[in-house]
Image (spheres, rainbow, N blue to C red):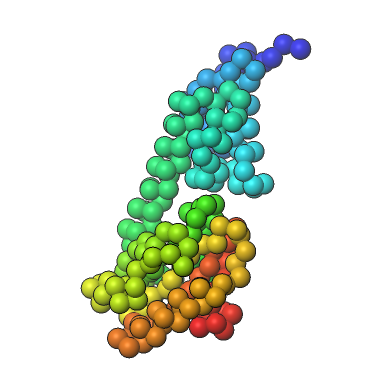
Amino acid sequence: MERIRMKDLPPADRPYEKCIKAGPQILSDGELLAVIIRTGSREATSLELADKLLALGSPGDGLLGLLHHSLTDLTGVKGIGKVKAIQLLCIGELSRRIWKRKANEHPLIFEHPEDISDYFMEDMRHLEQEEIHVMFFNTKQAMIKELLIARGTVNASVMTPRELLIEGLRCRAVGMVLVHNHPSGDISPSRADILLTKRVKEAGDLIGIQLIDHIIIGDRCFLSFRQQHLL
């Protein structure tokens, strides 16, 4: 059976022509990717390659997968070479930076643990090593500053509570939240997680910066120390 080529499709069905006529907002996720990919391979059209890319990763990831796939993941799709893969990686990173910049244009209010998990989930749920972040808040629960304080396990060298709280004092914070991920996906707190939480809470209480919560990020799930009465 002869393969259908993009140029064999009616102009109204070609993503590039549809975009010119009506704008990118009418394109499906696959069509948007097809425009970016531009050309297909001998075995597949750009639309078919786009569908394969959207099927990578966990079911339901779709376009969000572009934030997490590696160069090896992308070039593992037959028809996606290194140049196309690098373009897709850069588009994913660009999207992440645009979203973060937009989110930080106005003070972000975090009233519930779910708000915090939503903010970090897509950045952290696919990480292969642990990262520990701290969020500092004002009296209205608006985030003043976010810092990556350690990369690796909580048993490794991390910013001490003293160093952490100096940063909090510098930005005049009254509250803070610790956030870290478990690459295994299991959100059960470890003994090291519990000890770190206790140390930071005790140090914060001494100078008036309350540890509001400690959030553990898993794969599409999270645990709140506050909700679990561990804090």
Above or below for 29 versus 195: above
Above or below for 38 versus 66: above
Residue at horizontal 52%, vertical 45%?
A: 68
Residue 207 visible in this rendered orientation of the protein: yes
Specify whether 153 is left or right of 207.
right
Residue 141, image x, y percentages: 38, 75
Q: 218 or 190, which is in the foreground? A: 190
Q: 165 or 177, which is in the foreground? A: 165
Residue 90, image x, y percentages: 42, 37
Residue 165 visible in this rendered orientation of the protein: no
Of all residues, the one furthest to the front in this rendering is 156
Q: 166 or 12, which is in the foreground? A: 166
Of all residues, the one furthest to the bottom in this rendering is 206
Residue at horizontal 34%, vertical 73%?
A: 160
Residue 10, image x, y percentages: 61, 17
Residue at horizontal 45%, vertical 76%?
A: 196
Q: 226 or 191, which is in the foreground? A: 191
Of all residues, the one furthest to the top in this rendering is 2
Specify whether 206 is left or right of 81.
left
Residue 36, image x, y percentages: 48, 29
